[in-house]
């Protein structure tokens, strides 16, 4: 046997995903593949493919018998990926942006400053992961045999068998009047001439016919051939493989999805939002309230300081508050 390798491509792809769930393959060969296998089997017959019988039919025939399939590694087809909504999540250490002070200032312990919650609407991840669907192509190697059979024929020679007329002889009719010797001579003459006489077998004048055997028709047949049942020719069989690329939908998981900004509300920290720095030295004459760290509210006042809620620390450690402005 000989081995050949053919390739049929339905769709090509390249690997784009580090992790994927491949479709399950149990392929039925494409029409182009089955045609290529049949063509290869015919080619493997060589000169035998042209041998004909007397009726012009082909003496040799071959059929494709698939013997196995081996699937390669599925690869993602470019430009077919669709991210599964809601499946993306960030990885790594995030940073925050679009930070704003939310809510009113609050006091912490005995500090003469007021604080606020710093809330970010953007959580920025350096990398991300997500699920997706896509088309995946798999190269399947199909093994097959070309199984050969042969039809032989039997010759029937021409047949030529001559026939003959009825067998028998003429004799004198006992009731015939006249010269019996002459009658006998006439009957003997018929018998000596034989069945070439046009009236052979029929009574004639004073002669009757005695049948001794039936007439036989002549046999005249031309030569001819009959086809015998096909017989297997395993000595002419060949074994081959052919590659076919098939595409089906599958799912995957991307572990390197790139930077990802998550939108929401996250507490980025607690920072000073209202401060009344001394104009001279620490603990000296109070200055005036000033907004800090992006706070744009109007609660940086002593009036609010006096009623502001505590966000932490001791509520009884009030100190002297000498740096708190009058208003």
Image (tube, helix red, strand yellow):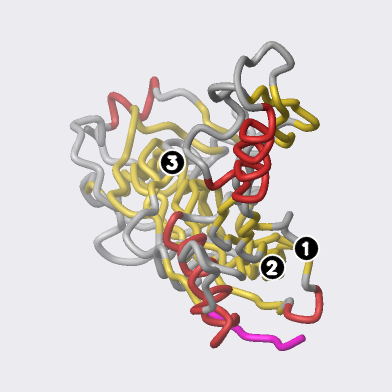
- Give the percent coordinates (x, y) of residue 186: 60, 38
Give yes or no for residue 211 being in the magenta stretch: no
Quadrant containing the N terminus is bottom right
Q: Is residue 6 visible?
A: yes
Contact between marks 1 and 2 (CB within 8 A): the answer is yes
State left or right for residue 2 relative to residue 122: right
Specify start and end residues of the magenta stretch as a single range: 1-6
* Residue drawn where x is 77% and y is 72% of the image: 233
- Give the percent coordinates (x, y) of residue 198: 47, 38
Contact between marks 1 and 3 (CB within 8 A): the answer is no
Which secondary structure lies at badge 1? strand
Of circles 1 and 3, which is in front?
1
| Residue 231 circle label | 1
CA neighbours of label 1 inside 10 A, class few (<14), some (14 to 19), many (20+): few
* Residue drawn where x is 52% and y is 42% of the image: 197
Q: Nearer the viewer, residue 135 or 84?
A: 135
| Residue 181 circle label | none
Q: Is residue 199 above or below residue 253?
A: above
Which residue corresponds to mark 2?
Answer: 150
């Amino acid at each position: 046997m000989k081995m050949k390798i053919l390739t049929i491509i339905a769709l090509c792809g390249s690997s784009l995903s580090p992790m994927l769930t491949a479709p399950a393959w149990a392929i039925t060969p494409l029409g182009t593949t089955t045609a290529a296998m049949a063509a290869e089997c015919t080619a493997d017959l060589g000169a035998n493919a042209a041998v004909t019988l007397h009726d012009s039919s082909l003496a040799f025939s071959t059929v494709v018998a698939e013997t196995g399939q081996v699937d390669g590694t599925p690869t993602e087809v470019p430009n077919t990926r669709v991210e599964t909504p809601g499946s993306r999540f960030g990885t790594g250490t995030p940073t925050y942006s679009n930070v704003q002070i939310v809510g009113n200032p609050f006091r912490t312990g005995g500090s003469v400053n007021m604080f606020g919650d710093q809330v970010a609407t953007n959580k920025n991840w350096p990398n991300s992961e997500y699920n997706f669907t896509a088309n995946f192509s798999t190269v399947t190697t199909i093994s097959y045999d070309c199984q050969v059979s042969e039809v032989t024929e039997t010759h029937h020679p021409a047949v030529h068998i001559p026939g003959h007329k009825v067998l028998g002889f003429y004799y004198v009719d006992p009731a015939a009047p006249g010269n019996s010797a002459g009658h006998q001579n006439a009957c003997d003459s018929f018998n000596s001439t034989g069945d070439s006489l046009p009236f052979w077998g029929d009574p004639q004048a004073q002669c009757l016919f005695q049948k001794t055997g039936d007439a036989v028709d002549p046999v005249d047949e031309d030569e001819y051939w009959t086809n015998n049942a096909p017989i297997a020719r395993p000595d002419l069989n060949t074994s081959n493989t052919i590659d076919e690329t098939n595409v089906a939908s599958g799912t995957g998981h991307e572990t390197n999805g790139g930077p990802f900004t998550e939108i929401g509300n996250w507490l980025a920290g607690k920072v000073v939002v209202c401060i009344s720095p001394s104009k001279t030295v620490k603990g000296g004459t109070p200055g005036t309230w000033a907004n800090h760290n992006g706070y744009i509210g109007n609660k940086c006042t002593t009036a609010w300081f006096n009623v502001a809620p505590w966000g932490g620390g001791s509520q009884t450690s009030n100190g002297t508050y000498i740096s708190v402005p009058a208003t």
